[in-house]
Image (cartoon, coloured by chain):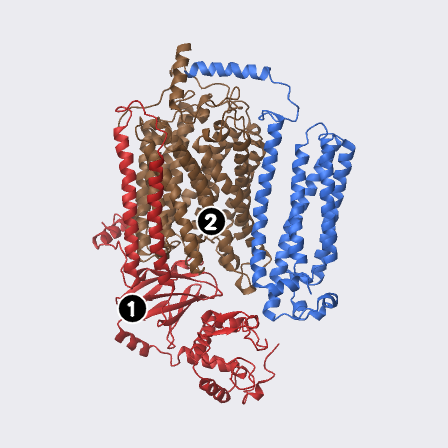
Chain colours: A blue, B red, C brown
Amino acid sequence: MSDTTITANRAATETESAHHPAHPSFQRHHFESVSQQFDATNFAMWLFLLTEIMFFGGLFTSYLIMRNWYYPAFVEGSHHLSIFWGTTNTAVLITSSFTMAMSVYSAQMKQKGKLVMYLVLTFILGLAFLCIKGIEWHGEWVDHHVPGLRFSDADFLNPKLDADVYKEYHDAPLSPEMAQNTEEYFFLYFAMTGMHALHMIVGIGLLGFIIFRARQGAYTSGHVTFVENFGLYWHFVDVIWIFLYPLLYLISRHT
Amino acid sequence: MNYISPVLWQFLQHWMSNFPLFPPEASKIAPQMDALFFFMVLVSLVGLTIVILLVLSFSILYNKTRHPHATQIEGSTLLEATWTIIPLGLFLIMFVWGALLYFRVYTPPANAMNIYVVGKQWMWKVEHPGGQHEINELHVPEGVPVQLTLISQDVFHSFSIPAFRVKREAIPGRYTSVWFEATRPGTYHLFCTQYCGTNHSQMIGHVVVMTPDDYKKWLAGSTSGNSLAQNGERLFASLSCNACHNNTPDARGPNLANVYGSSITLSSGERVRVDDAFLRSAILDPSENVKQGFVPIMPTYQGQISEEGVISLVEYIKHLDSNYRIQQTLNTTQLLPSSEGQPAPSGNAAASGEVKQ
Amino acid sequence: MSTATIVSLPDQSTARVPKMNFLTRENGLLSWLLTGDHKRIATLYLISITFFFFIGGALAGLIRLELLTPQSDLLAMDTYNKVFTMHGIIMIFFFLVPSVPATLGNFLIPMMVGAKDLALPKINLLSWYLYMIAGVMAIYTMIAGGVDTGWTFTTPLSTHYLNTHVISTGLAIFVAGFSSIFTGLNFIVTIHKMRCPGMTWFRLPLFVWSNYAASILMVLGTPVLAITLVLIVLERTVGIGVFDPAKGGDPLLFQHLFWFYSHPAVYIMILPGMGVISEVVSTFSRKRVFGYTAVAFSSVAIAVFGFFVWAHHMFIMGISNYAALVFSLLTMLVAVPSAIKIFNWAFTLYKGSITFETPMLYAFGFMGLFTIGGMTGVFLGATGTDIHLTETYFIVAHFHFVMVGGMLMAFLSGIHFWWPKWTGRMYPEKISQFAAVTTFIGFNLTFFPQFILGMLGMPRRYASYPPEFQVLNVFSTAGATVLGVGYLLPILYLTWSLKYGAVAGDNPWQATGLEWMTQSPPLTENFPQIPVMDHEAYDYEWLERQQQQEVASV
């Protein structure tokens, strides 16, 4: 049996390479059709985002547990974050999601000029987000709120030290043990925003690559999969922030 | 033989001297545990025999020479249901039986005598209420329920006595407990079973079960002169706890007499039962455990008292059934040459100014 | 046993391994290192995991030698700790987790669903590179002085009390984790989106089902391990204190996060093995797997329940008694699907036409040993007996019965079964049957005494032990020697067969999977044209009709 089939197979291979139908150049050889390729890569992206949710899930769980245990420390810790910069950053990120959505739309409409423009805007907004985050982190460094490296709980033992925050919230001093636990809050703050920023940096790097390719017209000839999937990633990172922002900045805002 | 291979020789010698295949049953729970164990072994053997019989008989009946053409069978819902429901039923029996034992092992009876065990890399430190102090040894009387309260001062350890079929992890930062009632005098293995670093396998010792008479003799022979509660009393005085916890009308700390086992309301409004764990956290983390109606002025003793110190304080407070003892403590404090370099408070009025913020 | 065999090889005097196949398509190192072909990546994986298996095996040998005598004499205590830690880490993260999925799964899943490749070939290659980077880091750790945390990284021991290479190990496992995430992701996408026409979900071979279930676990579980390891590394470098009781953290939180991955991880390891057994048992009894749907859904049930049993690793750690109750109950539930599988395999033999080639012998070994391994798992899942048996050699024996007796048997069974497909040549039958029997005997001799040792209370991870446990330990070490021979033999004769083995032809086993419908070794694109699945899985009558037609047409 096998001998005959082997020769048959070989013949088949030779003919196959000859009658290869005219596929678009971006269709990878192992897919049957462009729509299958799009479906598969899109589905893969969603799955990847699922793993990302589980990845952040570990941090969110830790946050939930610690917040429950050390509620006062978490409240006062969050009072020391800048709501102004936090809100600005949220706005920046949401706008960047809008420009990202517009770039996907432009790619679908095959408008190269607009695509590049929106991508560049997204790129700039992404950088702006990171800069603002940097400003905030610098503030925490100055205030000795960086756990492990440069941390002091003086602000929480004696809230009047930080006059601005005190004026707004009139925090009562925490007990020494509880004040110590603000370090857990700031650790989670840095871990979560840091992980998020890491994702932003990866995103911005990819975005640079996409802009480069878009200028060559790679995504305006019908092959929008990559831009679309990147868009999913970008929106996902945005959504993570939409959770981080209220958890870290807002839910303890009442005075 | 010895010159051919010492290992082989040793092996044969052991072979002759009949090595153990089953651990001794030396506690009340051990036979109950073993009953479940043997039930499980039985179920496993039956299950394994069924599987082996099926595979073997089918292999013989339906091998290719005897049965050259397979009959295609789709499956059978009835059979599927059978081997879903029967194992499930058996597993549920084991679950319930196991859970009963589990609750028994980890719920000490009220009349159990309490022994404290502190684990550290790489030894077990045992504190008896009578002040007897042991390392890597545990002497217990036969026929008396003994509760162990365990804590670790560094990493996770696990206190295991195979002959009693009990085991509990000693965890840094919180008390865990386990109890047993030894039934047979003898010396048994004590192991640390949670991997705890380089000398993990040296963190072993012996549990010595003694007849009540021997135990009494042992207690008398190895006392250090002070009971654990007495040590606690001293510590209580030297840390000036009595400055506030003295049950005078203007005392700044709550009354501690008979507090153990009662329920109190915290300033957060939460009601808690005062047990060992609560006392420990109230000493180390006082401002989170303030009794309603009191001001959080007590400083934390985290890092200032060793785990043994906390244990003796807990033991002391546990046995405070009247404030007479505290008054006595006040007097002792006055007699002490100097406690922690601070002036001995005379009466309760002088106690102010000592609570550091 | 009977000498009847199912093997039908082409006429050896004229048969040749096809000149054009995925192995010969391109030559040169670069064509391998930059390949997108799932079969070549599977080959790369096969070579690398074999390498790591032998490192892990050598470490296991050292452990058994040390335990020959009660004193810690061959190895110093800290060396012993490093040896068992590296044994665990290498065997689990570098052998068991990728073993069947990354080699056989990678090789077979596209062919089984009738696709030309996995959906994301570049990601597939990336996952091999991540695996290799992780492997190099692990080996660096070993050379630089090792790590002695145990593979469980228990805090605060791993974060505050050891000064070995915890960080590089943690990062190695972090990277290896992403390798397995990408493999799992690739499988799920492929199984969902790349099935050929006619290949419905219930026509998929059970191997695909079980790999699908394992992939779900990889994709959802591994990220949690990744973030946990990041926290460990941060704890060591910056001192953040999430797991440090002195700073208000909680070491039990670490246990929860770690076991949230590491319990499902054992199902990641065993499920693909179960898939192999389904294929092998069906082929060598010429029968459709008994209760196909039950077996398929039991895989999914294991994957789902597997996520909700993690705290059974913590029964004696001071979690609340009621939490222990819930997790024990769920553990009992997860045991049921495994029982279902065992009985279905046994009944697949009923009224079959059974032959006893090497893959089938390994499969029988699997069924016996996995039954023991699974049942002893129930001993540990029941809260009461767990108190006595956990953290002793009982748990070591249980784990090895499932992982070595189960998974490794399944892996070897699969390797022998698909070897002719992979290389185009048969392995030598007699010596491999001998190796299978040797492995089985050696395995039982090694690990059965450990059940007794565990019942006696001998704690695991002990470099020295009380002398009365020696006899059983000597048995165990003797068995390990036999087992070692059992594992060395396949390496030798499989390498030999690459050149001298009989030419296998397309379908030496007369099996029904789509992978057998193409040449051996397959073409780079697997099939001359995309096949159409027009019959149920394991339809041997269809195969017979097919063969009769062929004979008639010639």
Q: Amino acid type of disc 1?
A: Val
Chain of residue at mark 2: C
Number of marks present in the image shown: 2
Q: Which mark is residue C256?
A: none
Name the outermost residue toward the front. B78
Question: Between residues B157 and A243, which one lies in front from this camera angle?
Answer: A243
- On the picture, is A121 further left or further right than A152? right
Question: Between residues C144 and B22, which one lies in front from this camera angle?
Answer: B22
- On the picture, is B37 further left or further right than B172? left
Question: Between residues C181 and C424, which one lies in front from this camera angle?
Answer: C181
Image coordinates of residue C337 in percent, x first then y, are: 39, 42
- On the picture, is B29 further left or further right than B156? left
Label 1: few (<14), some or many (≥20) within 10 Å? Answer: many
For the point 53% across and 71% down, the residue is B284
Question: Between residues B354 and B260, which one lies in front from this camera angle?
Answer: B260
Chain of residue at mark 1: B
Q: Is residue C288 above or below residue C447?
A: above
- Check if mark 1's residue and mark 2's residue have beta carbons within 8 Å: no
Q: CA distance from mark 1 to mark 2?
A: 41 Å
Residue underneath mark 1: B209
Looking at the figure, which quarter contains the N terminus of chain C? top left
Under circle 2, the secondary element is loop
Image coordinates of residue B107 in percent, x first then y, are: 38, 65
Q: Nearer the viewer, mark 1 or mark 2?
A: 2
Image coordinates of residue C283 in percent, x first then y, are: 37, 27
Q: Is residue A21 above or below residue B17?
A: above
Looking at the figure, which quarter contains the C terminus of chain C? top left
Q: Amino acid type of disc 2?
A: Phe
Residue underneath mark 2: C308
Name the outermost residue toward the left. B16
Under circle 1, the secondary element is strand
